Image: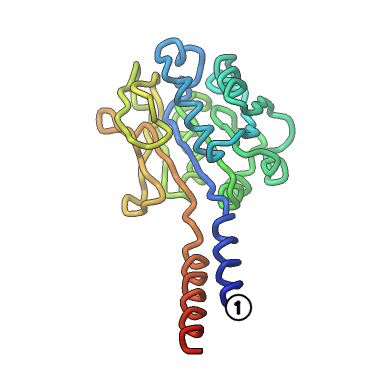
Amino acid sequence: MRLIGLAFGTLLIAGMFAQGKIVVNNDEWTLSSTGYSHAPDADRFARNVASWFTGGGSGNFLAYTNNFGLTDTQLANTMANAGHTWTVSTAGTLNLSLMQNYDAIFLGGYYTNIVIADLIQYVQNGGNVYLAAGTGVGGAVNEAGFWNPFLNAFGLSFAPSYNGIGGNIPINSPHPIFAGVSQLYQNNGNSIIDLQPANPNNEVLVFSQGQGLYAVYIVPEPASLLALGVGLAGVAGLRRRRQ
C-alpha cells in the first residue's frame, strides 16, 4: 500500500507540474491596431496564445513595455473579452518577484529594468512569455543582442538583422496558437533561428521566404518523476501478486 501511495503521489506531483511556455514573434506589428486592421485574425491569435498559456482558463497577464505592438486598445479589449486580466506597466524592475504575480509576461521593444536571468527562471518555474521583436528600438543588432541570452537558454535566437518581410503572412501551422488563424500582419521583423532542430521542445512554426517568423518553446514534463511513479506502481503490483 505504501508503494502504491508513493506511486500515485509521484504521479500527482508530475501532473501538477506547470510547463512554462514561450511564444516568439519576429515582429511587433501583429498585435497592434494596424495588425488588427490588416489581419482581423490577430484577435483569434491573441486569444489562442492566452489560452495556450493558461490551459484554457482565465489568466493574469502583464505587458511590460511601452511599445505600441502590445499597448494598443484592440489587444487590451481582446484579453478582457476573453476573461483575462490585462495590465500594461513598466513600473518596478521585472524580476522574479514581480513576474511570479502573473501567469504570463508580454515583452517587446522595451529593455529597461528587465532581469534576463530571472526571466529564464520564471519560464523554468512554469511561467509563460510572449516576446516580439522587429521593433526598431536600438536597431536590429542591439534588439537581438538584448533578447538572445533569454532565447538561447531555450534553443532559439533572433537574427541580428531585419528581414524586410511585410504584409499579411499566410499561416499554415496546426499548432493550437494558430487555430482558426489564416493570416497575420507584420512589417520587417527579426527572423527566428532554431538552434536545436532536434529538440522537440522548441520549434519554428511559420516561415516566409525561408525566414522563421513564429516559434514556440515548452518546458518538458518531468519524465523522471513519471517514470518513477510508473515503476513504483509496477513493483507494488508484482508484490501483491506474490503474496
- Image quadrant where residue 208 sits: top left
- Image quadrant where residue 97 sits: top right
Visible residue check, residue 159: no
Visible residue check, residue 71: yes
Q: Which is more toward the observer, 157 or 80?
A: 80
Farthest bottom residue in view: 243
Q: Give the x, y percent position of residue 23.
A: 47, 37
- Image quadrant where residue 58 sits: top right
**Amino acid type of the residue that numbered disc 1 sits on in the rendered structure:** Met
Farthest left residue in view: 209
Q: Which is more toward the observer, 37 or 7?
A: 7
- Tell me the element at label 1: loop
Q: Give the x, y percent position of residue 19.
A: 53, 50
In the rendered structure, the answer to whether residue 202 lies left or right of residue 111 reads left
Depicted 223 relative to depicted 35: above or below: below
At x 58% / y 61%, what residue is drawn?
Answer: 12
Q: Which is more toward the observer, 125 or 150?
A: 125
> How is colour applied across the structure in the image?
rainbow
User: Would you name the residue on which mark 1 appears?
Assistant: 1
Q: Give the x, y percent position of residue 101.
A: 70, 40
Q: Which is more toward the observer, 37 or 143?
A: 37
Q: Dot 1, how many residues are within 10 Å of its Cα: few (below 14), some (14-19), or many (20+)?
A: few
Work out which quarter of the rendered image holds the N terminus and state it.
bottom right
In the rendered structure, the answer to whether residue 119 lies left or right of residue 28 reads right
Farthest top residue in view: 37
Depicted 60 relative to depicted 13: above or below: above
Q: Give the x, y percent position of residue 21.
A: 51, 44
Q: Give the total number of marks visible in the rendering.
A: 1
At x 54% / y 36%, what residue is drawn?
Answer: 56
